[in-house]
Image: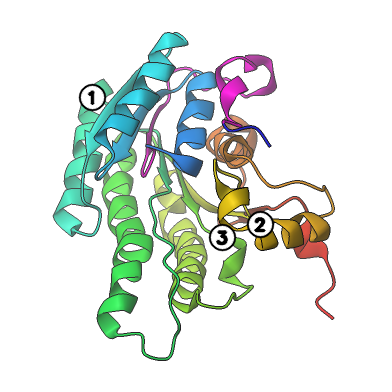
Amino acid sequence: MPDHPDAPALRDLRRLPDLTGQVVLVTGAGGGIGRGVALRFAAAGAAVVVHHRTGAEAARAVVARIEEGGGSALALRADLAVEEECHRLVAEAARWRGRLTALVNNAGVQPTQELAGMSLADWRAVADVNVHSVFACTQAAAEVMRDTGGGSVTHVASIEADRPAPLHAHYCASKAAVVMHARSAALEYGAWGIRVNSVSPGLIGRPGLVEDWPEGVRRWQAAVPTGRLGRPEDVGNACVFLASPMASWITGHDLVVDGGVSARPTW
């Protein structure tokens, strides 16, 4: 697996829908999946707002990468555990180009901890970022999109939304909430011309993952029908599709991007 699996992201324009004229905000876009999503939107022609909380340098690197490829990007900081910061971020993103046509709620945390002994503060630390920020950013974006002809919102969830994993109780519950929020928001915001969907990735590779978790990677590769880990651009491709005119009649849907691992028997 290459160290930077998103390397071709700005070169294969023919494989992507044309999103020229769209302005997309990607939360948590400084690295990992968020970086891959941001680069795919840029490759499709969208102007991209690259959100970060603490990774200013990484976010600037994503912006530089997009600009080097002839695209347009802006880095913005916000603490999405704070409701007011979510609304400020969306307002600044919309002000940049005078509109906001797409939001990808990607920012999230994935700590590991036994459920026994977990404090309410531990639980809330995951929910604040993974669930509450999705609610607040979506609400703020919907108000903007309602006044400018509609748009799309995509939540990055996880296959763990319905497949629990040890030490991930708070994470699994948060992602299940994100999937249901997308369906509920699709129901209520459809009349505003806003589509809301979720994308549920499986295991996505990153530099150092094989060294950090060799046994888990081996189990995944043995189980997944396509025989490989996911790449950030796999998730990005799904997000670009859902924001494109090709998905104009798709809302309230959870698009699983897991190489087929969910198709395996559970007994």
Answer with mark 1 or mark 3, whichever residue precedes in sequence.
Answer: 1
As displayed, is residue 223 above or below residue 107? below
As displayed, is residue 257 above or below residue 178? above
Q: Where is residue 207 in the image (x, y as percent from the top left)?
A: 54, 40
> Residue 24: within the magenta?
yes
* Picture mark count: 3
Q: Name the residue under label 3.
A: 158
Q: Which residue is drawn at 25% across and 41% down?
A: 90
Res 125 visible: yes
Q: Where is residue 29 in the image (x, y as percent from the top left)?
A: 39, 38
Which callout, 1 or 2, points to the residue nearer the camera?
Answer: 2
Range of residues picked out in magenta: 4-29
Answer with mark 1 or mark 2, whichever residue precedes in sequence.
Answer: 1
Check disc 3 and give the amino acid type.
Answer: Ser
Quadrant of the image occupied by residue 117: bottom left
Check disc 2 and give the amino acid type.
Answer: Pro
Which callout, 1 or 3, points to the residue nearer the camera?
Answer: 3
Q: Give the Cα distance between marks 2 and 3.
A: 21 Å
Q: Which mark is residue 214?
A: 2
